[in-house]
Image: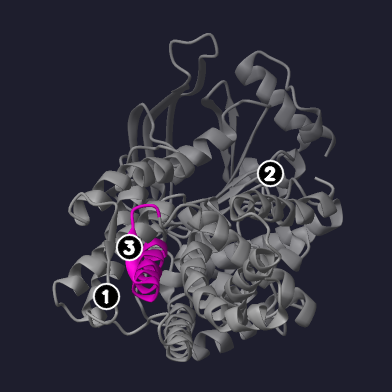
Amino acid sequence: MITLSNLISRIPGGIAQGIIWGIMALGIYITFRVLKESDLTVDGSFATGGAAAVMMITSGISPWIAVICSFLIGILVGCVTGLIHTKMKIPAILSGILVQFGLYSVNLHIMGMVANVSCNPSKNNVFITMRSIPKAILVGIIFAAVLIAIMYWYFGTEQGCAIRATGNNERMAKAQGINVNNMKVIGFALGNGLVALAGALMAQYQGFSDVNMGRGAIVIGLAAIIIGEVLSEIIFPKGCQFFTRLIFVIIGGIVYYLIMIVVLWLRVDSNDLKLATAVIVMLSLAIPNLKKGE
Amino acid sequence: MLRIENIKKTFNPRTINEKIALNGVDLVLNDGEFVTVIGSNGAGKSTLLNAIAGVWLVDEGKIFIDDVDVTKLPEDKRAKYIGRVFQDPMMGTAADMWIEENLALAHRRGLKRSLRQGISNSERETFKLLLKEFDLGLEDRLSTKVGLLSGGQRQALTLIMATLQRPKLLLLDEHTAALDPKTAAKVLDVTEKIVRKSQLTTFMVTHNMKDAIIHGDRLLMLNNGKIILDIKGEEKKKLTVESLLEKFEQASGEEFSNDAAILG
């Protein structure tokens, strides 16, 4: 039934999931906006994070330790993509596709060759679950705030500035003695670390990990980034600080997910959602280019 | 001090596009020497500069900076010794980063990039004073994105960045070629100030014969990947465009083929 109360009842859950997608988008922001590379590894590393976390939690390990381990595994995955790109000289986009493709097998191995492993919150110790949405929102916000603060600090350090310079102007970075290959590997590593961490949160939240849970993650992440940028330009037409831009990535994730909820509430076939998302992201990426007349 | 021993470089070897770009270049630049480098199109001026900077490795020969053999060092490792300004004003700076962030990046040239803050308050003060000295109107715009500056301002900033940490060698690759004449003159003025003040060993490639004659204390002319003229001291001071062209024709047996160099 299409009723308003039905829609309103779904909003808190949408916000909670939106925050988790927003955290994932923070990882994509590092590769897409800071390094200016398209890293398709994330479709795999999101599921890797979820798989690793669920396997640890269901074997009795603390969910906090599980999330940290997922982050570290994501870093490892990002290093692989980064090294394939920089050492084997394979274009970044293809390196990501290769790693993402291979991760499917790795993720199945992590989950004991089962495509879907449940992590029932009443039987397992989890700290973020859809059974308690207000708490899930709170935990999500705390995670987002801490991660944004760390990112803000890090990209102001010497190393963070070197990564930004690499994304901005590689020749200039080299002339300043920056090892651009190392900076790219670090960028891919941190990006995928955050994506895997978000995967670990999502698996807890939904109560299972699935080998396909990362499918389309890159598109959702880009949608969150772009929606956030559009909103920030409306609210701060004169531009805003890096810190604020990161907050808007999270807001973009929330808004993206709320849009999806409205669309689903309108009884649009969920199978058409991916096409709709792809078109929206394509148009949002195209509009700034077309405006410039390039 | 820069010492180059018989370096050679061929692009696209064993293909139809094979080009011998450097064909045995020997050169010693003493400390504090300011050399201008000129040559017709494709003579190897910028190629020689790129060979010194380490953009790619040479096929043969050796390159030493202060007796350190840098022949096999990649570009980013060599940057420790070298300050560089490119022809394209967009190339030397990071457009989306602030003026002070660009300066701070350059201030750490050749150093390890740690997790310390990328820029300190004392650096900000130093940068402000430095920019004021060059009268570019940038001293109060430290937190402006470099992308918003004019080409001339960006080149001047790149020059300051290249010399913020005293380089053993300053490489200028036709750094005024993309600017209008008035701005070019101003940037050359800044160049002269910086080079003389810190007595920098400088290698300036230019397409403009007059600039090559006016500036520097030594002039090199390249042709077909070789140094064919090396003029210093009193002889350099007496040079005119006409006498330089004459010397070129005697040395090479060809006519100089770069109108811009003669007319500019």
Asked whether A193 falls inside the magenta stretch, the response is yes
Residue in the picture at 42% in, 58% down: A177
Dot label at residue B111: none
Badge 3 amino acid: Ser
Mark whose residue sits in front, 1 or 2: 1
Residue under pointer 1: A68
Considering the numbered disc 3 on the image, is that residue within a helix, a strand or a loop?
A: strand
How busy is the neighbourhood of tag 2: few (under 14 within 10 Å), some, or many (20 plus)? Answer: many
Badge 2 amino acid: Ala
How busy is the neighbourhood of tag 3: few (under 14 within 10 Å), some, or many (20 plus)? Answer: many
Residue under pointer 2: B212
Highlighted magenta segment, given as a residue range: A190-212
Give the letter of the chain under mark 1: A
C-alpha span from label 3 to label 1: 17 Å
Mark whose residue sits in front, 3 or 2: 3
Residue in the picture at 64% in, 79% down: A6
Please tell me which of labels 3 and 1 falls first in the chain: 1
Residue under pointer 3: A209
User: Is residue B247 visible in this depiction of the protein?
Assistant: yes
Considering the numbered disc 2 on the image, is that residue within a helix, a strand or a loop?
A: helix
Q: Quadrant of the C terminus of chain A?
A: top right
Residue A152 position (above or below residue A109): below
